[in-house]
Image (spheres, rainbow, N blue to C red):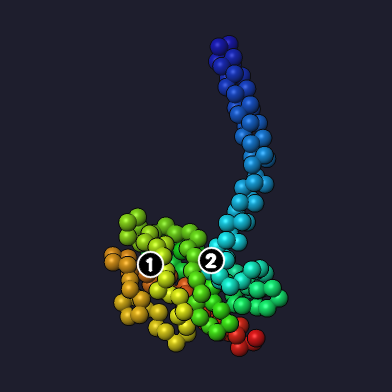
Amino acid sequence: MDKLKLGLILMAFCVISAGALAFVYLFTQPQIERYSRTSFECSLNAALPGADSFKETEQNVFEGKKGVEPVGWVFSVSPQGYGGKIGMLVGVNLKGQVTGLKILSQKETPGLGVNIIKPSFLSQFINKTAGDPLEPKQDIVAITGATISSRAVSQGVRQSIRSADELIKRF
């Protein structure tokens, strides 16, 4: 009888806890989605600073406009780093030049590969074009001890520039 009573009490606590969690989720979900959307829009602006609006034209490609005039694209790419996929946004203008990068997600080694998020590393890619080799230890200073992570970012930028060149040809 005591086991049944303890089981019912435990079940009551579980039902109350689940109900409370469901209530909190319903209350906070719209705010979390709004914050997530705003954060992504800020990341798009960081990748293509000249644009004031963005529209997804293809999967993982966002056309940036200033007013009604196109200024470039932002490409969402996920090259393979040392610790997994590196989610990043790469902005490219109508001249095929990189305008900005934003690392959205990464699982690189703390203290080493995680340094790919530093502005001093990312700024090396600004104004690079398809004519640049984009190779660590050639025209990009690799992060010491994190060559794989550095190569992954370079690969993502290279992929974005190639995609932009194809769009420019159609433009």
- Horizontally, residue 26 falls left or right of residue 98, namely right
Label 2 – label 1 distance at C-alpha: 15 Å
Residue 143 higher or lower than 138, as above or below = above
- Residue 125 makes an appearance in the image: yes
The residue tagged 1 is: 120
Q: Residue at x 57, y 61 (%)?
A: 42
* Extreme-right residue of the structure: 68
Image position, residue 82 (x, y; %): 37, 63
Q: Are marks 2 and 1 in contact (CB under 8 Å)?
A: no
For label 1, the SS is helix
- Amino acid at circle 2: Ala
Image position, residue 155 (x, y; %): 44, 74
The residue tagged 2 is: 46
Q: Residues within 10 Å of mark 2 (few under 14, many from 20)?
A: some
For label 2, the SS is helix
- Horizontally, residue 162 falls left or right of residue 171, namely left
Q: Residue at x 61, y 71 (%)?
A: 51
Which mark identifies residue 165? none
Q: Residues within 10 Å of mark 1 (few under 14, many from 20)?
A: few
Residue 91 placement: quadrant: bottom right
- Residue 160 makes an appearance in the image: no
The foreground one among 164 and 46 is 46
Q: Residue at x 35, y 55 (%)?
A: 110
First in sequence: mark 2 vs mark 1: 2
* Extreme-left residue of the structure: 145
Image position, residue 69 (x, y; %): 68, 78
